[in-house]
Image: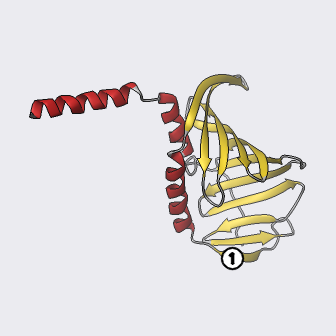
Amino acid sequence: MKSIASAALVLGLSGQIAHADPCQDRFTELYLQLDQGVPTKTIAINAFKGAPPSTNEFLYLNEDHYLTVPTEPAGPWVLGYQNVLYQSADDGKSWQKIREMDTGGNADQARADKLTNAETIRNAACSEEEMNGETLDVVAADITVSQGMVTENRYTYWVRRADNFIVKAVYDTKAPNFEMVVTQTIEKAPGLTLPTP
């Protein structure tokens, strides 16, 4: 009886391995990252359907020190630093406190939310593409995001093979009352320094 149970377990595991999707696994691994482990500079273009796009520069040292600079159209800078969110209307010359944050708690909640959303990942597709003289892996999938409101999304990552760094990401989002596409171009930013209030 024991040998029959063992054989059934082996067959079950073999079936799971046979149905494993390495492309979906790769997408899931990329999606679950909260950051890329190094300071980064990101140019983000946000395009809501029916509205002109906006562009932000996002400079990131770590989860507790980052800066968002709206560039098109220009707007107040927003700084996250030591559990407090600040705003500057004069290009960083002075800062006003907006509110306190729980950076650690927010990161824990973001991880939990991503794990929940990851259960909906489907229709993964992997390919490659030439960009700036190098071959990148392109990893995409559909995912349902259920925080705040339920949205259906197609996320696509362009990943440098040498260091598994995401150099570009496109987030195509559809909700009952809006559609938007966010395109991020990302680069490492060694030596990045950010203002402090």
- The number of numbered badges drawn on the structure is 1
- Quarter of the figure with residue 168: top right
- Please give the name of the residue rendered at 50% of the width and 57% of the height, measured from the top-left corner: 112
Q: Which residue is the site of mark 1? A: 99
- Please give the name of the residue rendered at 56% of the width and 44% of the height, measured from the top-left corner: 31
Q: Amino acid at mark 1?
A: Arg
Vertical side of 42 occupied by 21: above or below: above
91 left or right of 132 in image: right
117 left or right of 42 in image: left
On the image, the x and y values in percent for residue 155 come to 65, 40
Vertical side of 173 occupied by 133: above or below: above
**Considering the image in quadrants, where does the N terminus appear?**
top left
Q: Secondary structure at mark 1?
A: strand
| Residue at the left extreme of this rendering | 1
Answer yes or no: is residue 48 visible.
yes
Q: Nearer the viewer, residue 84 or 13?
A: 13
- Please give the name of the residue rendered at 38% of the width and 24% of the height, measured from the top-left corner: 18
